[in-house]
Image (tube, rainbow, N blue to C red):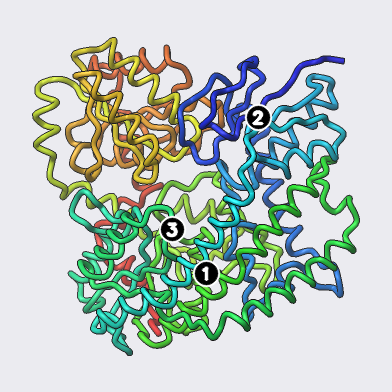
């Protein structure tokens, strides 16, 4: 029996443990933080990641829809006005890089290695008690390495947040609505409301919607709607008060938006809390009657992980239901002609879709990023019935025919709601003004754009690019971090200050892409936008995951997996002889299939999404 220990790193803010990098897994929550020596969770999963992940998604969804106590499933127990409130929580939301998904697959793989005799113990760096309990239940020794939070401090913070939250929900939000009465007038049938979330405004930049801006311009230009207004449907952020105020000011004043939660009533709180207690009691009985084997995924017991995730979801339900009620009333009173979303599968988007259905408002969603087979958020159980199916928009506009096929055949989406409308926001790139500052920075030198992504490999990708920048002094490197990656942005600013041929840029992508010779990223949609602009692109996939189809067929895009491979490829592309006419023709062909290039040339495809406006 081996004495080898497997280290799972969740808390990336602490000094890493001294361990064998080959047996150290960096299970980063959202790709933030500096890279430690070790392998990514996707490397750890192995070659079966795509098949294993798909099987887990279906198993997880079916666990929630499986009848238990009194013949009811968990969705039935959490029913509110004919919707399962669980769809508005994190519980059924399966994302590759954070939440339950990486924890479950790490547990499955660790137990498999233990049973093969390859490891004897797991050390978890971070406060991951449910995962530790799961491993122990599978007879695998596990030790937690984390600094416990002071309980008294935690309770005080919790109480203060509740006070702040109530102030925002029931006083400040109503003050905003009273101040901006003209935005919140009733019966705005000629108005299109569109969803907005912090970090979705192009700021710095022209202040438009990062994902929907181009489509909204088309809507107004073709007189489909007379007015477009953003709908602030999220709850206040208590983490960064300054950023929240700036977001509200731009949304409600600059863009004449609607504040959805201002329609919430404090008188509903008691009713919702009573309902939540009934849900908890029903779920408790449901769990008591479940046999242990019900929580086994491929012979690995995941009960502790499931129970902890379920309890966390139940605690969040009262606020989610309150938000649903507020948004429903908002839509019932304002009665817009339709509601446009960029968020079709995230919990907040599903909540907004449910509220629009209850209010009788047509909901339309647009694909906002690349969809690929291992994008687990887009996996549904096609056999689910009733409220075990997630709330879906009345029409879902996707980029091209390949997305329609993927979502309907593999994802389980109903074919009738899917429409190929083209990647509308990509057209906006052609109209952007080039940044004069970056143009001056580039001069006559080649420029490499390093586009950030909320992905676990980005730490090492950035490190590789800074290392290469130090070696290639004549090449200019521009780093464009993901707008949500605030922690890494400050680190990039510091590093760029130490190298004269590097710069950081937070403006619109269209202001830098025309200047670029190559675009680098993980598997961000930015790579496709680069191909759209006929700029060669490299997808750096350190984790060893299977490339998506578009990464293999986009003509002037290549996948690299090591620093040496990346360096060689960049130098060959900058040499000018790597890509040929056939590659650019392949790119054009794939832009049609994957991004619906020709559909973008007319407005008819978008107009059809809004037919049967309520």
Q: Is residue 153 above or below residue 523?
A: below
Q: Secondary structure at mark 2?
A: strand
Give the residue number, with chain letter if any, for mark 3.
238
Q: Residue at x 74, y 48 (%)?
A: 305
Front: mark 2 or 1: 2
Front: mark 1 or 3: 3
Q: CA distance from mark 1 to mark 3?
A: 21 Å
Mark identifier at residue 351: 1
Q: Secondary structure at mark 3?
A: loop
As rendered, which of 549 and 28 lies closer to the eye?
28
Q: Is residue 182 above or below residue 7?
A: below
Q: Which comes sooner in the sequence, label 1 or label 3?
A: 3
Front: mark 3 or 2: 3
As rendered, which of 417 and 168 lies closer to the eye?
168
Does the rendering let one see residue 416?
Answer: no
- Asked if residue 69 lies left or right of residue 7, the reply is right
Dividing the picture into quadrants, the one containing residue 196 is: bottom left
Q: Is residue 505 above or below residue 560?
A: below
Residue 512 point in image, percent of width and height: 20, 37
> Quarter of the image containing the N terminus?
top right
Residue 107 point in image, percent of width and height: 73, 37
Q: Residue at x 52, y 69 (%)?
A: 351
Q: Residue at x 40, y 65 (%)?
A: 341
Give the residue number, with chain letter if any, for mark 2.
8
Is the residue under label 3 in contact with that under label 1 (CB below 8 Å)? no
């Amino acid at each position: 029996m081996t004495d080898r220990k497997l280290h799972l790193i969740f808390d990336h803010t602490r000094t890493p443990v001294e361990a064998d990098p080959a047996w150290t897994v960096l299970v980063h929550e959202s790709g933030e933080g500096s890279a430690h020596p070790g392998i990514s969770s996707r490397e750890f999963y192995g070659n079966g990641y795509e098949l294993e992940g798909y099987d887990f998604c279906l198993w997880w969804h079916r666990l929630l829809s499986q009848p238990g106590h009194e013949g009811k499933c968990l969705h039935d127990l959490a029913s509110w006005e004919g919707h399962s409130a669980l769809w508005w929580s994190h519980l059924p939301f399966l994302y590759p890089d954070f939440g339950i998904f990486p924890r479950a697959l790490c547990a499955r793989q660790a137990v498999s290695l233990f049973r093969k005799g390859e490891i004897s113990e797991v050390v978890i760096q971070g406060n991951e008690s449910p995962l530790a309990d799961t491993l122990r239940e599978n007879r695998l020794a596990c030790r937690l390495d984390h600094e416990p939070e002071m309980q008294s401090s935690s309770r005080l913070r919790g109480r203060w947040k509740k006070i702040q939250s109530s102030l925002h929900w029931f006083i400040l939000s109503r003050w905003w609505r009273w101040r901006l009465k003209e935005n919140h007038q009733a019966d705005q049938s000629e108005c299109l409301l569109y969803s907005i979330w912090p970090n979705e405004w192009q700021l710095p930049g022209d202040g438009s919607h990062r994902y929907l801006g181009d489509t909204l311009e088309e809507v107004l230009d073709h007189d489909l709607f007379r007015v477009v207004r953003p709908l602030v449907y999220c709850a206040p952020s208590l983490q960064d008060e300054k950023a929240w105020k700036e977001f509200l000011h731009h949304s409600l004043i600059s863009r004449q938006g609607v504040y959805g939660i201002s329609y919430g009533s404090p008188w509903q709180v008691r009713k919702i809390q009573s309902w939540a207690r009934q849900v908890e009691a029903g779920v408790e009985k449901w769990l008591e009657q479940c046999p242990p084997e019900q929580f086994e995924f491929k012979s690995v017991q995941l009960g502790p992980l499931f129970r902890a995730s379920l309890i966390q979801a139940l605690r969040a339900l009262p606020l989610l239901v309150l938000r649903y009620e507020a948004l429903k009333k908002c839509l019932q009173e304002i009665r817009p002609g339709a509601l446009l979303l960029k968020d079709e599968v995230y919990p907040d988007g599903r909540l907004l879709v449910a509220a629009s259905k209850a209010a009788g408002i047509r909901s339309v969603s647009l694909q906002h990023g690349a969809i690929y087979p291992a994008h687990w958020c887009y996996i549904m159980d096609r056999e689910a019935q009733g409220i075990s199916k997630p709330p879906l928009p009345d029409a879902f506009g996707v980029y091209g025919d390949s997305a329609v096929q993927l979502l309907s055949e593999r994802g389980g989406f109903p074919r009738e709601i899917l429409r190929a409308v083209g990647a509308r926001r990509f057209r906006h790139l052609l109209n952007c003004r080039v940044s004069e500052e970056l143009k001056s920075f580039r001069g006559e030198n080649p420029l490499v754009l390093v586009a950030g992504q909320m992905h676990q490999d980005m730490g090492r990708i950035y490190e590789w690019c800074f290392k290469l920048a130090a070696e290639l002094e004549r090449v200019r490197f521009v780093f464009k971090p993901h707008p949500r990656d605030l922690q890494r942005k400050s680190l990039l600013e510091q590093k760029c200050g130490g190298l004269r041929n590097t710069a950081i840029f937070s403006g619109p992508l269209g202001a830098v892409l025309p200047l670029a010779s190559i675009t680098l990223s993980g598997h961000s949609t930015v790579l496709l936008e680069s191909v759209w602009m006929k700029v060669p692109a490299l997808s750096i996939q350190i984790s060893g995951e299977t490339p998506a189809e578009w990464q293999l067929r986009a003509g002037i895009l290549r996948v690299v997996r090591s620093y040496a491979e990346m360096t060689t490829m960049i130098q060959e592309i900058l040499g000018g002889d790597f890509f040929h006419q056939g590659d650019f023709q392949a790119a054009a062909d794939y832009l049609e299939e994957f991004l619906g290039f020709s559909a973008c040339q007319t407005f008819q495809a978008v107009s059809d999404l809004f037919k049967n406006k309520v």
